[in-house]
Image (spheres, helix red, strand yellow):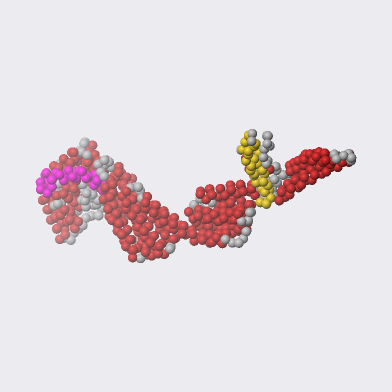
Amino acid sequence: MEAATLELYQKNIFRITGLPVDASPKEVSRQVQKLQMLEEMGGGGIAQAAFAAVAPPSVEQVRSALARMKEPEHRLVDEFFWYWPEKFGESKSDPAIQAVLAGDGQKAIDIWVDRENEGSQTARHNLAVMFHMFALDWTNHQITTDEVDDRDEKVKGHWKEAFQRWEDLAGTDELWEVMKERVRSLADEALTTGFVRRMRQVLPQAFDRINAEAALRFAEKERMDWAQYHVDFMRETHQGQDDVDSTAELVLTPTRKRVEQLVQSTREKASKDPKKGTQAVVELMEHCKPLMALFDLFHGVDSHQRSDLFDEVAGTVATVVISYQTETGDNHTFVELLEKALAFATGTQVRERLIKNISIGKNNLAWKHLAPLFKTLEEMTGSSASSAQKLEQVRARILPQFPALVAQIGGKSEAYQQMMDSAAMAIRSISIEAHNKHQNHTAAEEAIQLALKLAIDSDLRTRLQGDAKALAESKKDATCHFCGREPASKDATFQLALYGDVVRSYGGVQYRKGSVPIPRCHTCKGKYGNADTAGCLLWLACAIVGAMAFKISRPTTDDWIAGAIIGTLAGCVVWWLARFILKNFNGMKSPDTFPGVEEMVRKGWSVGDGPGRYG
């Protein structure tokens, strides 16, 4: 795991020294002497064999490599990731290894390809190492240069060729038996076959770590296409044998610690001076945004690894800017920074906290825009003007302000609803005043309909709809029933007598009496009075005419009394006909058609002062 980095092959002991993997202590000693001679002569490093590093190693790098060769575990790992002879200890007679040492890499490749086709696991191992080395060399080149390269597909081909072989080899016992035999041949007490067993267990994770580091380096350079390629490669290779998430956490540990340090530093800066906390959280979010992209890349947006860490970032931003807003009252910066913090938050509690405070800040900002409007509404509704004048002022001064205010506060904001509902409530008060104080039903009705158009809150709309219904009912009572045009007057109300619940017995008749008030205007009251007066006059005239007619026709008798009686009876008929004609054929409705009367009749009541004694 220590060796599994992007420099796996660049720091390989055998690549640096040019020695074969089974070099004897005597060969290593000769290489040290050769190095010393070159140094004394002022020369450079040791001449390179095939597959040499891009940058030739320095004398110091060679010396360090030779020193590590004395550490058995380091040497065994580097042997594993370099070219093997068909049989350890026989490199001098292995044509492919000799070709490598002579600098003829192509000849070595040709030999390994032929041997692989013949079934050689050693040749397959060597080709896996070669393609893996090519892939890492080009990957390091891609990371360190910004040049556009047309070798992308070739590099991907190297990765594919390497891992087709590594995945086959890692699961075969033959490969690991070779390694165990190599341990036994070294006969070093510090090295056991148990080390080989542990190598086999962690090899898939070690390979993942290399690709994870590549992904991390590409992401830091904002080369997200290649970063994603290496993450996908991790997940596609060694499936079921590795633990990609734990490997990702391993390479992300420095990033996690960096975020935690940034959070702590931000809190400390803000606690010293809340007014300067905004600059601290701006720097925190600027530093953490690209780092969050790394966690998204490796773990996904919804992963707990990502949420746990960056919810803390969002929560810190919230705490700091709330303190800042309390100190300064700067709602604009407050809302702006909280909205940016939402990008870091995935946890429900953190997001709810941010959204709640954003809403508060926006309402505070909206209130500054709405305050003049509310002040105007308050002055208008409290003025001594009539309700009709107030309604006209609303149309002229309040409603024209709405388009500009909506553009400022947003048509879906809580402040928008507050504005619309507040205006609706103010207009409702005008409607109530128009109805109760001024008996201006027209203004009351217009106001309530305008309020209904503005209101958004469901409870307020229900209340306004109830008001509109009550106004409609009130309008019926406020209009004369008889003409249906003029407003009714209380002192002109017509009381129509009714009776009901009639019970007849030998002792007489029992019943309940009642009346229905019918709204009437003074004009119709006068017409009703005229009809009654005319009827009475005609009745009296008939009585007098009857008496006089009998007196004239029989002057010697007292039959004028009989004539008066007959005239009176005739007058009753004429009186009833006159009243009926005047009340029913002058455009007035009959009181019997009033809804309240019809309702009582449906319940069994009758119009009149009472029933006849004998029915």
The residue sitting at 57% across, 59% down in the picture is: 381
Q: Main secondary structure of the magenta part?
A: helix
The residue sitting at 33% across, 55% down in the picture is: 312
The answer to whether residue 55 of the structure is visible from this angle is yes
Q: Is residue 246 left or right of residue 468?
A: left
Q: Is residue 309 left or right of residue 25?
A: right
In this rendered view, identify the residue nearer to me: 73 or 87.
Answer: 73
Q: Quadrant of residue 557?
A: top right
The residue sitting at 27% across, 53% down in the picture is: 253
On the image, the x and y values in percent for residue 370 come to 51, 59
In this rendered view, identify the residue nearer to me: 88 or 247.
Answer: 247
Tell me how many marks there are. Answer: 0
Q: Is residue 515 left or right of residue 173?
A: right
In this rendered view, identify the residue nearer to me: 156 or 574.
Answer: 574
Which image quarter is the C terminus in?
A: top right
Task: Indicate whether residue 542 is drawn in magenta.
Answer: no
In this rendered view, identify the residue nearer to me: 481 or 441.
Answer: 481
The answer to whether residue 604 of the structure is visible from this angle is no
The residue sitting at 79% across, 43% down in the picture is: 539
On the image, the x and y values in percent for residue 576 come to 76, 41
On the image, the x and y values in percent for residue 573 come to 77, 39
On the image, the x and y values in percent for residue 385 come to 62, 60
Task: Indicate whether residue 195 is drawn in magenta.
Answer: yes
Q: Quadrant of residue 357?
A: bottom left
The segment highlighted magenta reads 184-209
